[in-house]
Amino acid sequence: MSSINYSEKIPNNVNLAEDRTLQRALEQWQPNFLNWWGDMGPEGSQNFDVYLRTAVSVDPQGWAQFGYVKMPDYRWGIFLNPAEAGRKIHFGDHKGEDVWQDVPGEHRANLRRIIVTQGDTEPASVEQQRHLGLTAPSLYDLRNLFQVNVEEGRHLWAMVYLLHRYFGRDGREEAEALLERRSGDQDNPRILGAFNEKTPDWLSFFMFTYFTDRDGKYQLCALAESSFDPLARTTKFMLTEEAHHMFVGESGVSRVIQRTCQAMNELKTDDPGKLRAAGVIDLPTLQRYLNFHFSVTIDLFGADQSSNAATFYSSGLKGRFEEGKRQDDHVLKGQTYRVLDVQNGQLVEKDVPMLNALNEVLRDDYIKDSMAGVERWNKVIEKAGIPFRLKVPHKAFHRNIGTLAGVKVSPEGRVVSEAEWNAKKDEWLPSAEDRAFVASLMGRVAEPGKFANWIAPPVMGINRQPIDFEYVRFN
Ligand SMILES: [Fe+2]
Ligand SMILES: [Fe+2]
């Protein structure tokens, strides 16, 4: 089960050849996917040889192989983690029963919606990032962008497999629609807000892969607990790929910080004007980008109180992050959770039924995890001897979903008037001028081992290759 058959048109470890109808349906979807990749995948990259990793097994030891690939020839396939014998449902009202190998009729609509929503984010991020290859700061970074892109394409395959295999005709229709929506399109946008934002420059890309791919990690972890076993198994394997995406973000931002700190020490200044003139990104600008990406991403977890979240949990569709490690009854009836509320224009805490607050529980787990990486960035600044610290903004800052959408809050968590918000928002979020400055730094660096001035080289290359390895051949 764990070996992948690469002799088939669609590489897979799900015995696709034994289900001719399904195989034919997916083989019909495949050219549409490739057309989408041609139209919306990385711009102008079709003929490049890229040093990519491809999944060759789902065995945690040695699951991937590295080599030069032209991206349209990447072997996108269907890989599920091996089934766990005797796996039981371990949360919600069905706790203790066998997991489902098929979709129970009463949960069909909700499961389809969960899978479509997850699936929609995958091609969306490829669309958001499609112009970035033109301005990559190095071959190393260009290769990492393309790696993220092809794997997001494979994540789409993972969800499309479930739709085709378990949801019949409406599943096939949803799979088509996943190739028709477009990030940022007025008439037919992607489902979730953050996936309709632009990723116009590499600082945005690194912030996106740090913050927004981490949302992906938390959603996938919650789905990896699912009672619908094929969903649990496919998301578990997606998580092995996801780790690299977050590494690209964390190390990318860290290298930007390192370069900025180096310039600050050389020039003995913290004046953003002087630093910008020296071609590096000042720390307050980095803070504003962080504020933007963090706040837009935490909206993705949904409303702080949600009856859907309660239903998804109680019916066993979606668990909590690390459900199995938690020491409670895994049913959660009668338990409460503290959320923020707005009363008389002020933020107050209140206890609500935990089942309804599970979006908030997941968001809070996410926030803890994202703060840890920001502290690692602060270590870089501290090591350079610079008295500046990056901060994750308050949870209520710049929110557009849930209770907190109704109030304007500063990054420190102070409720402010509309007038104060308007006066200060360019100190708190990237201004048009910030974005124009960052854009002005973007320009392709294509010589092996060379890096744009605004970013430090990485500590190590990919797959133990040297940093000056030719990660992309343009041909
Ligand atoms: Fe993904
Ligand atoms: Fe990702």
Image (cartoon, rainbow, N blue to C red):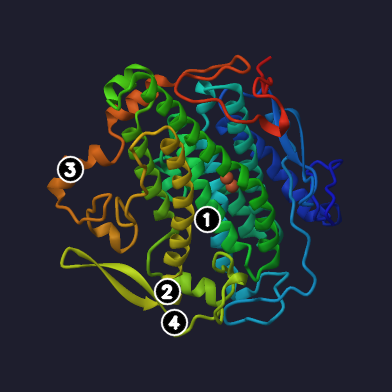
For the residues labelled 3 and 1, say whether their Cβ atoms are less than 8 Å apart: no
In this figure, which residue is indicated by the disc labeled 3? 422
Tag 1 or tag 3, which sits nearer the N-term?
Answer: 1
In this view of the protein, which residue sits in the foreground, 70 or 328? 328
Pointer 2 local density, CA inside 10 Å: few below 14, some 14–19, many at least 20:
many
Q: What residue is shown with label 2?
A: 356
Residue farthest to the bottom, as pictured: 334
Residue 382, horizontal then vertical, whole percent: 41, 38
x, y percent for residue 460: 64, 31
Reply above or below: 39 against 233: above
Give the amino acid type for the residue marked by disc 1 in the picture: Thr
Closer to the observer: label 3 or label 1?
3
Q: Which mark is residue 335?
A: 4
Within 8 Å: ligand 1 and the Cβ of disc 4? Answer: no
Helix, strand or loop for disc 3: helix
Asked which quadrant contains residue 97, the reply is bottom right
Mark 2 or mark 1, which is nearer the start of the sequence? Answer: 1
> Quick one: label 3, few (<14), some, or many (20+) residues within 10 Å?
few
What percent of the width, then of the height, locates residue 7? 87, 41
What residue would you read off at disc 1? 117
| Residue 209 vertical position relative to residue 201 in the rendered view, above or below | below
Which amino acid lies under the numbered mark 3 shown in the image of this protein? Asn
Residue type at mark 2 is Asn
Under circle 2, the secondary element is helix
Please identify the quadrant where the N terminus is shown.
bottom right
